[in-house]
Amino acid sequence: MKNFKKQLLAGPYLMWMLGFIILPMLLIVYYAFFSNHKFTLSNVLAITSEVNFKAILLSLKVGILSTLICLLLSYPLALILKNIKFKNQNFIVFLFMLPMWMNFMLRILAWKILLSKNGILNTLLFNLNLPKIQILNTPSAIIFGMVYDYLPFMLLPIYNSMAHVKKDYIEAALDLGASRTRILFQIIIPLTMSGIVSGIVMVFVPTLTSFAISELLGGGKVLLIGNVIEHNFMQGMRWGIGSGLSFVLMVFVFISMILSSKFGEDEKGGTGVI
Amino acid sequence: MKHFFKKDFSHKTKKISLCLVLVLSLSQVFSACGKTKNRDSHATPIKNNVNSITVLNYGKYMDEDVIKKFEKETGIHIKYEEYENPEEMYTKYKSGSIKYDVICTSEYMIQKLMSENELKKIDFKKLSNYNNIDSNVLELNQSYDSKNQYALPYFYGTLGILYDTKKVSKADVQSWNCLWNKKYNNEIIMENSVRDTFAAALKKLNYSINDTNPKHLNKALSILEKQKEHVYAYMVDETADEMVAGNAKIALCYSGEAATAMESKSSLAYTVPKEGSNVWVDSWFIPKTCKSKQNAIKFLDFLCRDDIATANFDYVYYASPIKSVVKKQPKDVLENEAVFPSKKTLENCEIFTMLNQKTTDYYSDLWMKLKAY
């Protein structure tokens, strides 16, 4: 009886999953493989056309670069946060979370104004007699925006797993004469691997599929695969091709998920070894 | 973890059921709100939707007070929806999830819907303010609506060049070539919509803006690809803001948008190049999904009334086809090419005609090629 009640409570969530997650996915797959109720591969193969292929390559490049930069920025930061002697460490984490309370599109719009040709940043540089920077409307600006937006998604899981690393391990290693770099590479990094992996997935997936940031900071000059899909759905009225491309993108997302879960498992097996 | 759940379960259920009760009661409050609102706007309680119309219009294309006034005067409730570009409107309408009663859009999209038999005839004799519409604009609409039976003009204007008079010489902007002038490297804003940007390229090559010859279109694409590295950005709604901020010197732009920019920065000016350009007429039509044609016609008639059309003109600031509104305007507004196109300009301009599905797809592919270049 109790069990049944429990399941009943999950009911609304199940309905939600069916209606808003499973069903749309099935629709996408249907549109991707059927046109006029006949099976076809042409929608999925649309990815091989020059334009779409270029777009997905650029998306992958932007996604990988932003993820890497996020990782390189967050990891040392998490280390610092862990070791900092501050009364309330959570307060600093809270500071990093704070911008996330504001809509991310608004923050990107703000960057657009800051980075624009006669924007605040360039005026400042000009007054200091420094050369202006013009990265707005280029892929660099998009990577910049993505790193800015998704940094907390990398930082938080890493910081979380870092907080769980017991001080005893590190002290023991120090007692046994391990150098600081050795501690980092043989103790801390392996122990925080799960955080790193989930951070990578949480940043890579949205950066790969994003279309809004590239539209805002790219000035319509940079075409990512998300923009192609959006164009096919919203303007070209070509739902088939849009779904086909979405399907290909989903495959990429699944691949990254599978890779991440594999790494996660390895890490679990490895915790006790050192 | 499991143990924890069991122990804490009764407590949790209480919490969750509390939440549920809250949500339910809130939803009831909201639905009650909806009901009272309906009663406010109508004299007698009505069954849902009977005395309401659903309106679909471009974003920022109508004074909000106009809607309130209409509701107050007629007791007809308006559900107002907005969209950004005609293609989006088409998708929204075609998906069929909302039944629209009146829609305002660009002429080439109306033609497309007309060819698909999606329009209802409007009996314009029933509109008491119909005589107030400029016959010249009705004539423009005749290019696709030969007897003026389907579309009611709302605003019109041209596609041209907005430029900063302090940084760009007036002689340069008399021709579309200026958008390809290397002098203005990284200072050019193009339209982020297929047909407008291609119209500029086609006109530069001396083709019609309605040319469908793939050879000509490819030629246009190749000059646009060459131009891309000199372009600052492809934009739609932000063009005016960017020009006012001085982030670019020259922009492909609609007349109305240009007028708004010129209001905020006096050094900006607007012109239509000598090779000719596009003249557009945004019109209202009644789609097949309309449930209450009578109410829809009431709404259209209301829009043509002098005080309402004036309010909308002041808000939108595009050329109005309503004669009594034009009469009221001072000379400098009438002579402002960005608000009211001159006769000479109009003679030199073409209206966009509808493209068949094949050419639309072709255009779409070319556009993606340009964007990926």
Image (cartoon, coloured by chain):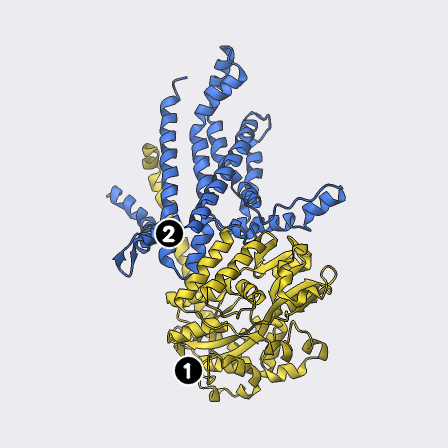
Chain colours: A blue, B yellow
| A46 and B236: which is toward the camera | A46
Q: Name the residue type under label 1.
A: Lys
Please name the residue shown 55% across and 58% down the image.
B223
* Residue under label 2: A46
Can see residue A209?
Answer: no
Q: Nearer the viewer, residue B276 or A7?
A: B276
Q: Which of B158 and A49 lies nearest the eye of the viewer?
A: A49
Labelled pair 1, 2 in contact (Cβ < 8 Å) = no
Name the kind of residue labelled 2 in the image: Ala
Residue at position x 72%, y 76% in the image = B332
Q: What is the chain identity of the residue bearing mark 2? A: A
Residue at 48%, 40% in the rendered image: A61
Q: How many numbered marks, from 0 up?
A: 2
Q: CA distance from mark 1 to mark 2?
A: 40 Å
Q: Residue furthest left?
A: A1
Looking at the image, is mark 1 or mark 2 nearer the viewer?
2
The chain that hosts pointer 1 is B
The image shows residue B111 at horizontal and vertical percentages of 44, 74
Q: Examine the image and state in which quarter residue B243 appears.
A: bottom right
Furthest residue to the front? B215
Q: How many C-alpha atoms fall within 10 Å of the one at disc 1: few (<14), some, or many (≥20)?
A: some
Q: Secondary structure at mark 2?
A: helix
The crowding category of the residue bearing disc 2, from other C-alpha atoms within 10 Å (few below 14, some 14 to 19, many at least 20), is: some
Same chain shared by disc 1 and disc 2: no
Question: Label 1, on which residue?
Answer: B121
Q: Quick one: quadrant of the N terminus of chain A?
A: top left
Observer able to see residue B188: yes
Position in image of residue B40 (x %, y %):
49, 74
| Above or below B200: residue A30 | above
Q: Position of residue B194 (x, y in %)?
A: 50, 62
Q: At numbered mark 1, what does the secondary structure look like: helix, strand or loop?
A: loop
Viewport quadrant of the C terminus of chain A = top left
